[in-house]
Amino acid sequence: MRKDSLAVGKVEKSSKKIIKTDGEHIIHLRKALEEEISREGVSAIIRRAEEVVGNLYDSEEGNGERRGLIFGKIQSGKTNSFTTSLALAADNGYKCFVVLTSDNLWLYQQTISRLKKSLPGITIVGKEEWDHKVNAIKTRLELNGVIFVSTKNSTNLNKLVSILKETGANKYPAVIFDDEADQASLNTNAGKEDDEPSKINSLINKVRENFKIRTYVQVTATPQALFLQGVENLYRPEFTVLIEPGDGYIGGETFFADSNFDHLSDLVSGDEINSLISSKVRSINKSLPTGLKRSLCMFYVGATIKLLKGEGTHFSFLCHVSLKKADHEHIRDIIQRYTDDMAKILFNKDERKLKSLISLLEDVYNDLSNHVKNIPNFEDVVEKLSFYISSTDIQLLNTDSKNSSGQPTYDQVYNILIGGTKLGRGVTIERLLVTYYGRQAKKPQLDTVLQHARMYGYREKDLDVSRVYLPKHLAERFHLIYESETALREVITNHKDEGLRAIWLSKEIKPTRTNVLDPNELGAFAAGKSYFPHKPLYLKKDINGITEKIDTLLKDYINKAESSRVPLSLILEILRYTKTEESSPGLWQEKRISLAIEKLRLENKEAHLVVRTGRRLTRNDNYYANRGLGAVYQSNELRLASDNLPTLFMYRQEGLKGDGWDNYRFWIPVFRFPAGNYAIIFNLS
């Protein structure tokens, strides 16, 4: 079965507010967006923004807060979505906005720039302007409104709290957009005996508490950590708005799930990655390993083809294999040596060396020729490559590099980017054609690995020359994460108004970092294990008529020697009628089990059903003092369960007064999950 992950937060129906969609802000923004996105795509973004604005907390509801989430895909344009939501909110009377960005100077400046271009009718003030624009901010708040933009940095957040008070902004109903909210905003002291929240988390709380009327909108493509918070936690979303990518988006399905695009992934050995990142190996190995060499040739040929076809002027190659700066330096040195050698060979036309290089270039050219329409002649590709290759720009993107902002530059035709953490969240790499990926964590986290997928995005026009080089186990991990994300979005779509959520994933990967989760609040269903309600409802007044309804559903399966294969939809219908006390210990809840079965339906349409009657469990005096029922089924009955399919056992109890019940028959379910390498994690609240 699939080893997926699904995670959703409480989602409430949008209110019936009448949303104005023809205001000045949205009219301007629509025109700007339509220069880059189709009219239909812009309309879809505006529809999602209406959903966000429909859920905003307003003054008519009194003082309070609503928590929401804009849930997009990696590199899918989440910034456009929250900017459009902001514009629509401004057209509908909101005047005070806060935008929180990650503590990365380049991303902060990029956010400021995008907001100013998109929303010229609103005053946008960054952290550098707060002190000398106090009076101007007061005035603008009374006019078209103000957007305060801050990085999630303790110094800036403290200043933001002060300026909100000084300007009187905190008197207005506010909308706070927290970009990448799952990254730096959560309490990293979760579960510790000391209840004090971590510094950034505490300061964001103070920003929110400034406003008596506020909506806190989280923005991310990886909400696993948010959805595993407790229901009452300040960082668990109350409503979720799904953002679907527009035309031309390429994501996990294309790279790691669709067999029609298997050619996009080239596998390299784990030993090759180790040769690049192991200090013992790299000290003696100064040559380029086979896979990295081929990936560079693929990049050069693919980029040159695009150049010759007039489909771009600058292109990028990404190498992301390690966090260590020493590894980055080593990789830059060996790539620099190899590209210099290529340039010399092509320039000097040394016959012996040229033959070997031409053979490799021709091999990748032939590979690309199967996918590129109207491909230029190979000789023309080599000639153009010979002219431009010597100007290849190799950039290190880490904190020690001179380009410390983390922003790549694209001044040359061929741009090779090498780095670690700064190649993660928020960095969009222009015209990325080839990715060489090898980040190997001992305990990988789903949300972190997904954020590494810089190859995703609006890259359809470059798909014909795109490639990803990585070890097999990492390709399998990306496939798992794609399935996880898909399941997550399907559950949100199908259960939009339900608050019960869970995360389903392979045991090989964690949903998120452990320091933002309280282990005391987490529970898990395990593959191949059986679960039942320890305190089923049994009083006739509570379940009158329910037993008879279940009897009808099960009449064709009662006391059969073997299990019956039935539609999984029947299992769901049966469990609609079983009832459990709210105080029942253990993991069983009908809604929780039903949500898990909904996930199973994505892979399995059928299940096994075992029905037994005439059972006489005893409810003793310690039933309420202890953990309710100690056992429901006999261990030998589990042989009837399938390893490959879910199995529901239904046991009808006689419910006799002498056994401690209410002289009314009732049913107890036992659900066994199919075998596999997965678990379902959820917050017990």
Image: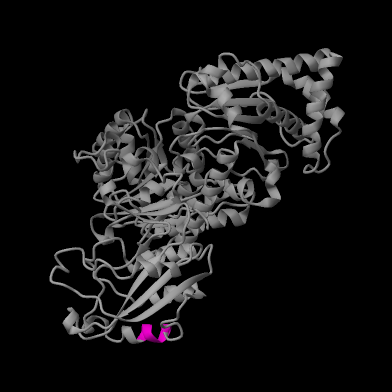
**Is 390 located above or below residue 373 in the figure?**
above
Res. 496 visible in picture = no
Secondary structure, magenta segment, majority class: helix
In this rendering, the count of numbered labels is 0
Asked whether, in this view, residue 469 is left or right of residue 165, the answer is right
Instruction: State yes or no: residue 62 in magenta.
Output: no
Q: Residue 177, position in %: x, y?
A: 38, 45
Tell me the quarter of the picture where residue 44 sits: bottom right
Picture coordinates of residue 509, whole percent (x, y): 45, 44
Q: Is residue 411 above or below residue 259?
A: above
Task: Decide if residue 180 is on the left or right side of residue 230.
Answer: right
In depth, the one of 658 and 223 nearer the eye is 658
Residue at image point 42% right, 86% down: 555
Q: Which residues are magenta?
A: 549-554
Near-viewer residue (615 or 443): 615
The colouring scheme, among rainbow, by chain, secondary structure or one colour, is one colour
The residue positioned farthest toward the front in the image shown:
636
Please report the residue visible at 40 percent of the width from the left and 60 percent of the height from the top. 54
The residue located at (54%, 29%) in the rendering is 321
Q: State the residue in front, 115 or 275.
A: 275
Residue 553 falls within the magenta-colored stretch: yes
Q: Quadrant of the C terminus?
A: bottom left
Q: Which one is nearer the viewer's eye here, 120 or 331?
A: 331
Point out residue 620 in the picture as x, y percentages from the top left corner: 16, 72
* x, y percent for residue 394: 62, 21
Using the rendered image of the protein, determine whether residue 159 is visible from the camera's viewpoint: yes
